[in-house]
Image: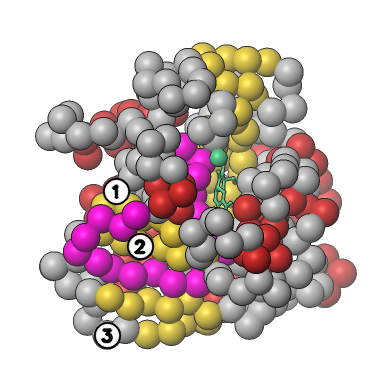
Amino acid sequence: MHYVKRKGWEIPEREATPEAIFLNRRALLGAGAGLGAGAILSGLPAQAQSAQDPSAGLYPARRNETYKLDRDLTPEKVNSEYNNFYEFGGHKRIFTAVDTLKTRPWTIKIDGLVEQPRDIGIDDLLKQVQLEERLYRLRCVEAWSMTIPWTGFPLKALVDLARPLSSAKYIRFETFLDPKMGPAQKQSWYPWPYVEGLSMAEAANDLSFMVTGAYGKPLAKQFGAPIRLHVPWKYGFKSVKSITRISFVEAQPKNFWQSLQSAEYGFWANVNPDVAHPRWSQATEEVLGTGNRVPTLLYNGYGDYVADIYKDMQGQKIFF
Ligand SMILES: Nc1nc2c(c(=O)[nH]1)N[C@H]1C(S)=C(S)[C@@H](COP(=O)(O)O)O[C@H]1N2
Ligand SMILES: [Mo]
């Protein structure tokens, strides 16, 4: 089933969560056999949690061991200091610029072709889902990659909560639109707000993950707090950050990069080393933090999970 069969590629748990939290969790799990880590940790005194975030007690969540890596996790410091988040500028040092992002209160509008449109607060939503940790790879269209211990819940669970009508063919995700939070949204040549989309079949796939945490903690702002998508078989730009609206729609949504430059970016954007970007090769990728360049894999190595979705779509530009 999985593209990685080799033993010994698994990352020890202590490398995915900060050491102190890991040790704490071990001790607590020993003491409270049977209870989930989240339930135990939520009873901890404040100094064991990152105080400001009301969801801190939900982390770290239990690892779902189904998702294996073929390489080391990217160190938290490397991942946290090299990000794309154009609402805060076109550079990678987003962590120096995200203070203006306010993640509470945070409301997500669910609308379009659903039984009942509604608004839901992030902390309400978190009460209705089961968080888990997954180790995933991220391949940016710019030919670099990283590996991240994300925490979140399957997008499928959110679709079930939203109860879409059968006429819904796609999900459209939207990031906040507020130049006070994201000052680069004053740059009027970009088609704000950031929009992305998935087909309903893609959204139902096991891999599609709504991310609310990383490295055993609530998401740092530069990762797209308080909630972002991760679809690891697609180029990173599909994984939209800081989501405020989720709409079920009939027509294929046009995404941010398509709107900006349709000659270079399409809707499906599945990773394929043999389909070059108009301006550069996609054959290899720089693995951030290692100095290594490695071959890029079809569907970023997740073909066993997702290739079936596209089996009747070969005439379409599924790798662009
Ligand atoms: N709202 C929003 N979402 C976004 C982006 C962005 O600029 N704005 N950049 C995308 C791109 S190009 C990539 S590679 C990933 C980067 O995610 P990371 O910074 O967590 O690695 O986020 C994606 N999601
Ligand atoms: Mo990207």
Ligand 2 located in image quadrant: top right
Q: Is residue 241 magenta?
A: yes
Residue 283 drawn above or below residue 10: above
Residue 173 drawn above or below residue 11: below
Would you say 250 lies left or right of 239 here? left
Which residue is located at x 44 percent, y 43 percent? Answer: 261
Bounds of the magenta span? 234-254
Q: Are marks 3 and 1 in contact (CB under 8 Å)?
A: no
One can see residue 238 in this view: no
Instruction: Give the number of the mark in front: 1 or 2.
Output: 2
Q: Which of 39 and 155 is in front in this view?
A: 155
Q: Is tag 2's residue or tag 3's residue first in the polypeptide sequence?
A: 3
Which residue is located at x 49 percent, y 18 percent? Answer: 281
The residue at which mark 1 appears reads as: 202
State the CA–CA distance, disc 1 to disc 2: 12 Å
Which image quadrant for residue 165? Answer: bottom left
The quadrant in which the N terminus is found is top left
Q: Is tag 3's residue or tag 1's residue first in the polypeptide sequence?
A: 3
Residue type indicated by callout 3: Gln
Residue 29 drawn above or below residue 70: below
